[in-house]
Image (cartoon, grey):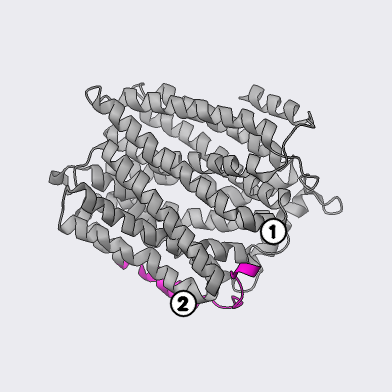
Amino acid sequence: MYALLLTCKTLESVKSETTPKHPTWWVPSLYFAEGLPYVMVMTVSTIMYKNLNISNTELALYTSWLYLPWVIKPFWSPLVDIFRTKRWWIVAMQFLIGVALAGVAFTIPTSFFFQITLAFFWLMAFSSATHDIAADGFYMLALSEGDQSLYVGIRSTLYRAAMILGQGVFVYAAGKIAEANNNDFVMSWSLSFGAIAVIFLLFGVYHLWALPRPATDVPAVNPEKGVVATFVETFVTFFSKPGMLVATLYLLFYRFAESQLVKMASPFLLDTPEKGGLGFLTSDVGLIYGTFGILGLTIGGIVGGIVAAKGGLRKWIIPMAAAINLPNLVYVLLSFFPTNDFFVVTAAVVTEQLGYGFGFTAYMLYMMYISQGEHKTAHYAFGTGLMALGMMIPGMWSGKLQEILGYQYFFLWVMVATIPSFLLAWMIRGIPESYGKKEHI
């Protein structure tokens, strides 16, 4: 691992005149690489552990803990600003993620797989969170404001494409390999993670060549203040902004219902009818939730971006809260009126994901809004850290709660848990009417 980082340091110092500068060479691949490890840690791990007979209580608790790197990344996001270039951080973290993926692949067949694969998922999560900080900051440094607007749709689309590969194609392939080998999920998940590890190591090699070297990508230490003062200043300037109490609660509770639903959606589809589930195969879940569902999420996000660009964030913040929460009702209906009809279940999941994608637009725009000003890279990281905390803690108890209540009453509870999202969206004040409209994004 140290050798990989040393190699990154050495190669970073070699400035090649042939390095492409045009964003099409690196924006799509960079955001594909940003999305893939996140979905592996947050979603694919849950499905894998379910296949390997880990209980809902344990898989929800321990995979929710994997949000922690995204929760606490504000504490080291200033370090990404202060030490080395963001380009160096991007490439180094991609190599580390590749190593972590390989570690998962090699340790799945062991008798202590649960503990050791979780350790590698932790390494992957910390590397991925650091990669997010560097990639988002690099995007703002390497592109003009006009190009940032032009490529925002492309980066979002490629991030979603990574989710389809990880949550859809990858899960489908793992399921099919297992089905062809007497449901040998140990072998199928090992092979699948090995393949993704190779892909990610190739990303690291590619971005050594493809990423530009903007003149502004330099360590951000203020020589008059020093490292510690610069570090502290980023926190003070963020939390002293007007309206930060309500803003913090909004970031924590906007996805309160979704944070619990997302951990139990795949187990619900996979569990047998005797356990209250729908009894679908792993490959089916890869298609339903990971492919068609993500396509619905993507379409919802695109439509959300279009309407926000026309009407602005202030106009859409409450309707989008309704969009992200009310479609959760489809899981209540599926649990009370279970069916194994592939098309009916797919339609229900796509409906929920469409609403999620549409409603999540307001959340992302609001994080961008409160991150404006000096230290915007670190301040955006603070926002995403609060978002991750809001996903982590409710997710931790969701598995135990589901096993106590059963799927039917658990999904009813999820609907009750939507209330804070509506209240906090209504309490948000001070957003300019023009913010979010096309000329301001």
Q: Could you say which disc has been placed on residue 252 in the image?
A: none
Task: Indicate the secondary structure of the residue bearing disc 1.
Answer: helix
Q: Which of 129 and 178 is in front in this view?
A: 178
Q: Which of 366 and 16 is in front in this view?
A: 16
Report the span colored magenta. Answer: 416-439
Using the image, determine if residue 306 lies above or below residue 141: below
The image position of residue 436, as x and y in percent, is 58, 69
Give neighbour class at mark 2: few <14, some 14-19, many 20+ (Cα, 10 Å): few
Q: Which of 135 and 423 is in front in this view?
A: 135
Q: Could you say which disc has been placed on residue 146 in the image?
A: 1
In the picture, measured across the screen, residue 25 lies left or right of residue 328, that is right
User: Residue drawn at (59%, 75%), measured in percent from left and top?
Assistant: 431
Which residue in the structure is indicated by mark 2? 426
Tag 1: residue type? Gly
Q: Is residue 66 visible?
A: no
Q: How far apart are marks 1 and 2 (CA)?
A: 32 Å
- Between disc 1 and disc 2, the foreground one is 1
The disc, 1 or 2, on the residue closer to the chain's N-terminal end is 1
User: Residue drawn at (53%, 48%), measured in percent from left and top?
Assistant: 70
Could you tell me if the residues under marks 1 and 2 are in contact, i.e. CB atoms within 8 Å? no
Give neighbour class at mark 1: few <14, some 14-19, many 20+ (Cα, 10 Å): few
User: Residue drawn at (32%, 52%), measured in percent from left and top?
Assistant: 398
Q: Quadrant of residue 421?
A: bottom left
